[in-house]
Image (cartoon, rainbow, N blue to C red):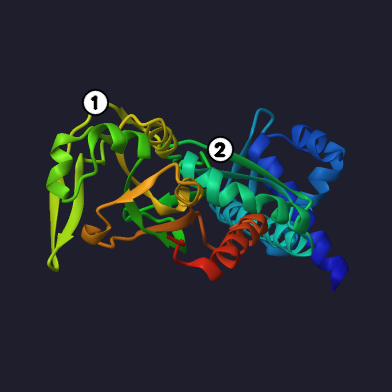
Amino acid sequence: MAVIAVDRARELEVFSAVAASGSFSAAGRGLSLTPSAVSRTIDRIEARLGARLLLRTTRALTLTAEGQAYLAAARRILADLDEAERAIADQGAPRGRIRVSAAVSHGRVCIVPLLGEFARRHPQILVDINLSDERADVAAGQADVAIRAGPLADSPLMARRLSENGRSVVASPDYLARHGTPQTPEDLLGHNCLNFNFRRAEPIWPFRRNGTDYALAVRGNIEANSGETLLQLALDGVGVARLGDFGLGEAISQGRLVRLLEAFNPGDREVFHAVFVGGPHMPARTRVFVDYLAERFAPTAKAPR
């Protein structure tokens, strides 16, 4: 039975090559077969089926209706066979390049430190990481896995929840010595508040007073597309910023930044997901990478403050 299965697969391959090239000679060159061997294979298929698949003339080969149906089935079967072989091979040892996209600040602090252990576990996977605050289009093939913060738009992509993170209003001691320390959110109206310039971001910071949430429109003279940039500006004493807690720990512990207005912090959380193309044809390297991130983030699902 094994020999017959192999022969059938080869016959499907030969027939597909003939249909694609329109020539016994061209198909034979691509498969390292003689034209006569290709012709005998087609004759054998037609004899077994009892149907004409190709109309042969001196100028061209044309598929019959039965040939069209057989070609569709042949291509589907060959594709399934290739996918099955790749899946089995990947289960043995995931391999290949995986392109990962993450925001600069979160990627540097939370993703890059995890890559060394992943590389030791999976030495045959090449991790190609791109840190940028511009969103890569996973559906369009710009990345295999993207780490996204905040609400996810409706899409056919799969998402795996990794962690969540709070946000804090911060400034440097130097800035506060020069401009004073705000005691209420409204005091920020007299301060230089540094903001993101993303189209999806607005210069509105949320606060909570006496159990009621509200938003305050703040202003400043610098906007940036990167949390890393705003963090550096805050460290340099340029102004006040509202940033993710994941990137503040070292600066806070060293006294280089001070948290402000904590009594008014609304406690909003920003959720991080790994976004990727799922489904039965997802490469094993993508699966093991997403599983690894979920494993490493699991013990600290809430970023420490």
Q: Residue type at mark 1?
A: Asn
As helix, strand or loop, the secondary structure at mark 2 comes to strand
The reply to whether the C-beta atoms of the residues labelled 2 and 1 are less than 8 Å apart is: no
| On screen, residue 213 above or below 61 | below
Residue for point 78% across, 50% down = 124
Q: Callout 1: few (<14), some (14-19), or many (20+) C-alpha neighbours within 10 Å?
A: few
The residue at which mark 1 appears reads as 221
| On screen, residue 268 above or below 63 | below
| On screen, residue 92 above or below 41 | below
Q: Residue type at mark 2?
A: Asn
Task: Pick the residue in front: 79 or 256.
Answer: 256
The residue at which mark 2 appears reads as 130
Task: Pick the residue in front: 264 or 212.
Answer: 264
Residue for point 63% across, 57% down = 289
Q: How many marks?
A: 2
Q: Callout 2: few (<14), some (14-19), or many (20+) C-alpha neighbours within 10 Å?
A: some
Q: Which mark is residue 18?
A: none
Q: Which quarter of the image is occupied by the N terminus?
A: bottom right
Residue 265 image-quadrant placement: bottom left
As helix, strand or loop, the secondary structure at mark 1 comes to loop
Furthest residue in direction top, as rendered: 221
Task: Pick the residue in front: 194 or 115.
Answer: 194
Residue for point 48% across, 67% down = 301
